[in-house]
Image (cartoon, rainbow, N blue to C red):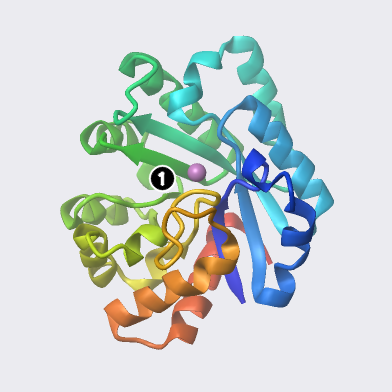
């Protein structure tokens, strides 16, 4: 059974068929899904989904691009959500210098505050990092992430960065990008990283794998990602599914 470690089923892209799509997950081999909050509103929506579906767990957090909405008052609310029984991680949090908004200092401040929150709550973190490898690693070291646990999701940096992330004991989230023909760096990282440090993810509704690139993504496409990983590593598809499932259960303390 597949463990989907990163999706956004509260997204409006799923408004038309959310219930029928999610209801079809178990019969299609999807055992668990982590629905990931990206701001205060989607964290609230995530909690609602975890209450509705036994196989959906959630992450509470504010994506770097949305950190301008944070203040002490709503941060206290976010902290409370981390005590909900099916909230198993803080995320997605991090730095995004591709969109580069709000100011980097604001992004850094709330990345650190949310890392500290995860440490306090003894929860793993789901890190989003785009075009910000150096600052992400610097903050992870400063905040002593080697004493925490987590995943750098949609990992898209070169092998040298992967090595540092792995050395801190973190997992690498691998999604549809690995199937893109021009994704040389990600394929190299998949070859390099031990299978017991890889998580499968889609980031649905974004980043659909080939041959669905550009379409709405869903966890039903994860087999395409697992097949590509199996091909790159020269191992069995079933092994990829089984080990990544064990990895995610261990990281998120599920099952
Ligand atoms: Ni995401």
Q: Position of residue 49 (x, y in %)?
A: 76, 46
Residue at the extreme bottom of the image, as rendered: 236
Crowding at label 1, few (<14), some or many (≥20) Cα neighbours within 10 Å?
A: few
Q: Position of residue 204 (x, y in %)?
A: 54, 52
Q: Residue at x 23, y 69 (%)?
A: 192
Q: Residue at x 49, y 49 (%)?
A: 206
Location of residue 174 (image quadrant): bottom left
Q: Is mark 1 within 8 Å of ligand 1?
A: no
Residue at the extreme right of the image, as rendered: 52
137 lies left or right of 123: left
| Depth order, front residue of 38/145 | 38
Q: Position of residue 250 (x, y in %)?
A: 55, 63
Location of residue 56 (image quadrant): bottom right
Q: Is residue 201 visible?
A: yes
Q: Secondary structure at mark 1?
A: helix
29 lies left or right of 238: right
| Depth order, front residue of 110/220 | 220
How many numbered dots are placed on residues in this image?
1
Q: Position of residue 15 (x, y in %)?
A: 72, 44
Residue at the extreme top of the image, as rendered: 72
Q: Is residue 131 above or below residue 186?
A: above
Q: Residue at x 25, y 54 (%)?
A: 162
201 lies left or right of 104: right
Which quadrant, please, contains the C terminus?
Answer: bottom right
Q: Which residue position holds label 1? A: 147
Q: Is residue 89 above or below residue 222?
A: above
Q: Is residue 247 above or below residue 71?
A: below
Q: Is residue 11 visible?
A: no
| Depth order, front residue of 64/118 | 64
Which quadrant, please, contains the N terminus?
Answer: bottom right
Q: Residue at x 43, y 53 (%)?
A: 214
């Amino acid at each position: 059974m597949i463990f989907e470690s990163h999706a956004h089923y509260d997204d409006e892209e799923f408004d038309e068929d959310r219930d029928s799509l999610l209801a079809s997950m178990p019969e299609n081999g999807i055992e668990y899904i982590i629905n990931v909050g990206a701001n205060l509103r989607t964290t609230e929506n995530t909690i609602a989904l975890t209450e509705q579906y036994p196989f959906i767990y959630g992450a509470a957090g504010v994506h770097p691009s949305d950190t301008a909405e944070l203040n002490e008052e709503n941060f206290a609310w976010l902290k409370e959500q981390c005590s909900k029984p099916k909230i198993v991680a803080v995320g997605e949090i991090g730095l995004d210098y591709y969109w580069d908004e709000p100011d980097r200092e604001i992004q850094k401040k709330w990345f650190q505050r949310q890392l500290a929150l995860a440490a306090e709550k003894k929860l793993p973190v789901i890190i989003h990092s785009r075009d910000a490898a150096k600052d992400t690693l610097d903050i992870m070291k400063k905040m002593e992430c080697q004493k925490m646990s987590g995943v750098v999701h949609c990992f898209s940096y070169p092998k040298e960065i992967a090595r540092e992330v792995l050395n801190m004991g973190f997992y690498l989230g691998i999604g549809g990008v690995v199937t893109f023909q021009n994704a040389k760096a990600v394929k190299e990282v998949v070859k390099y990283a031990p299978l017991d440090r890889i998580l499968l993810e889609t980031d649905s509704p974004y980043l659909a794998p080939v041959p669905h690139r550009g379409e709405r993504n869903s966890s039903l496409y994860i087999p395409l990602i697992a097949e590509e990983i199996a091909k790159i590593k020269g191992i069995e598809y079933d092994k990829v599914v089984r080990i990544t499932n064990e990895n995610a259960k261990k990281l998120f303390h599920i099952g």
